Amino acid sequence: MVTLKEIAERCDVSAATVSNVINGKAKTSEETKQKILQVINETGYTPNVIAKGLRIKRSRTIAIIAEDLAQFTSPAIIESIMDACEKLNYRVIVHNLRLYDRWQDTWYNKESDYISVINPVINDVLSTQIDGVIYVAGHARIIKTFNDNFNLPLVMCYAYSDSPNIPSVVIDDEKSAYDLVSYLTKNGHKRIGFIGGRIENLHTTQRLMGYQRAMFENGLLFDPNLVYYGDWSREAGYEGAKTLLKQNVTALVGLSDKMSGGVYDYLWEKGISIGKDVSVVGFDNESISAFFRPPLTTTELPLREIGEKSSELLLKKLESLNNESEDDTTEDDVKKDSVEVIKVPCKIIVRDSVATL
């Protein structure tokens, strides 16, 4: 197997020059660069990632810890993370905690069950040659699993970190709900029902804030009687519609497309025309929402954008650490990134379920 040193000898340059060309950091003439690339192509040289990792304590491998791959938000996020990593020649190892598959929605407050699953995975990650971690949550909440002493660069994805040193990338729930309710008010709706998830859920509380702000800015008083809390299910949407229609609402906001499906069920049973007599909007833009009759106006979760931003934050950090190791600089020589919470808004998908009054 040809080595980097042999490539350098054939090109009459230093091994460092060859390494810089391979890593896209060439500070040499275009002629020399092309000569090196030609020899690499002719010899079939492949960089020894493991050897390089041992030398500079980097393996160009990251771990994704997913709470559940079957959660509908996870695949698009993880696909976009892997795509970004592959473009920079990082390998990805995915750990699936299967929390929802194990315990459905009952595990949120069972700390011992959660720890029994997450701790072995963290130990596995820390015991192997991993450069960094992206934790992909199943729903927004504050996660306290990782503290300031965690030994690897980490980004919290689709949830909030409890540590001020760990960046988070999340949905901008408040703005997304604000935009959706503002769309209803622009169409003349004043009595707008809100069918939320669990009252303590961050998605629910932040979207309720967006709902309240949109109502206020359009001169409409907040009425708590127009708010119904459920559990994100179709059944909760059905019960929410049953309750809120008694309040003479002209529009209903379901905080998930499944809940909006339950709203459709109830309105259909009562012979109420959706998009004419009562307007309905949803959240998530799951594939089924386009097949509702009438097709559901909803919001599209920016899942790929969240994955892309999460990987961007982590890879930027790792590349700076790689440069630090290769240049033999100290930690004080590298500017530390400011810790942040990045909120990505949703996009309204307008279909046929909203009437103009």
Image (cartoon, helix red, strand yellow):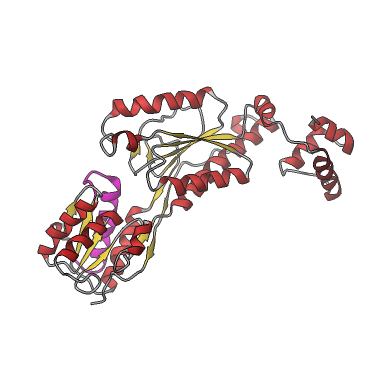
> To which quarter of the image does residue 272 belong?
bottom left
User: Would you say 81 lies left or right of 347 here?
Assistant: right
Q: Is residue 221 visible?
A: no
Q: Reply above or below: 48 against 300.
A: above
Name the residue: 39% across, 51% down: 171
Q: Residue furthest left?
A: 246
Inspect the magenta stretch and tell me whether residue 244 lies in it.
Answer: no
Q: Find residue 238 and report its horizontal and vertical position in percent.
A: 18, 56
Q: Reply above or below: 141 against 97.
A: below
- In-front residue for pair 333/125: 125
Q: Is residue 49 visible?
A: yes
Q: Find residue 354 and report its horizontal and vertical position in percent.
A: 28, 71
Query: What is the number of callouts on the image?
Result: 0
Q: Residue furthest bottom?
A: 357
Name the residue: 16% across, 66% down: 249
Q: Find residue 128 and report its horizontal and vertical position in percent.
A: 55, 24
Name the residue: 29% across, 57% down: 210
Q: Image quadrant for the C terminus?
A: bottom left
Q: Main secondary structure of the magenta part?
A: helix
Q: Find residue 184 and report its horizontal and vertical position in percent.
A: 27, 69
Q: Reply above or below: 5 against 170.
A: above
Inspect the magenta stretch and tell me whether residue 218 lies in it.
Answer: yes
> To which quarter of the image does residue 267 belong?
bottom left
- In-front residue for pair 178/195: 195
Residues drawn in magenta: 197-221
> To which quarter of the image does residue 131 belong?
top right
Q: Image quadrant for the N terminus?
A: top right
User: Would you say 65 lies left or right of 12 here?
Assistant: left
- In-front residue for pair 149/24: 24
User: Would you say 350 lies left or right of 320 here?
Assistant: left
